[in-house]
Image (cartoon, rainbow, N blue to C red):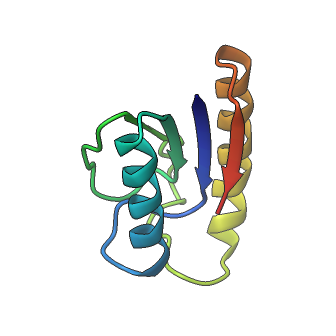
Amino acid sequence: MRVLILAPQPFYQNRGTPIAVRLLAEVLGQNGIKVDLLVYQEGEDVKIPNVTLHRIPAVPGLSAVGPGFSLKKIGCDVLLWLKSLQLQRKVKFDFVHAV
């Protein structure tokens, strides 16, 4: 089984939703499910078995994305959507889960 997780946030950061997303990816990976995790361009690279981390491209002006609403996040979300389309053209996912 192959799952795409869309997590519109800097990943990994030791706070709230990124912790929950990491735990979700770890549990899926531990159960033999191949996970593609698509996140913003910022954050710590972490190694999780059976999980491939994909990041949107770094664009000047779209850095230091924090919690809560911001215009930067709208730009990052557009890039996340485009990257997700690119991934879905290459790979047949059984499920797409958005956080």
| Quarter of the figure with the N terminus | top right
| Quarter of the figure with the C terminus | bottom right
Which percent across, then down, holds residue 10? Answer: 45, 62
Q: Residue at x 49, y 74 (%)?
A: 17
Residue closest to the eye, 88 or 31: 31
The number of numbered badges drawn on the structure is 0
Q: Residue at x 66, y 77 (%)?
A: 70
Residue 77 occupies which quadrant of the picture? bottom right
Q: In the picture shown, does residue 95 fall above or below 39?
A: above
Residue 38 occupies which quadrant of the picture? top right
| Residue occupying the far front of the picture | 31
Residue closest to the eye, 30 or 87: 30
Q: In the picture shown, does residue 73 fall above or below 56?
A: below
Which percent across, then down, holds residue 27? Answer: 40, 53
Q: Residue at x 51, y 53 (%)?
A: 40
Q: Using residue 26 as the reference point, say whether residue 24 is left or right of it.
A: right
Residue closest to the eye, 61 or 96: 96
Residue closest to the eye, 55 or 65: 55
Which percent across, then down, holds residue 53? Answer: 41, 39
Residue 23 occupies which quadrant of the picture? bottom left
Q: Residue at x 74, y 31 (%)?
A: 85
Which percent across, then down, holds residue 74? Answer: 72, 63
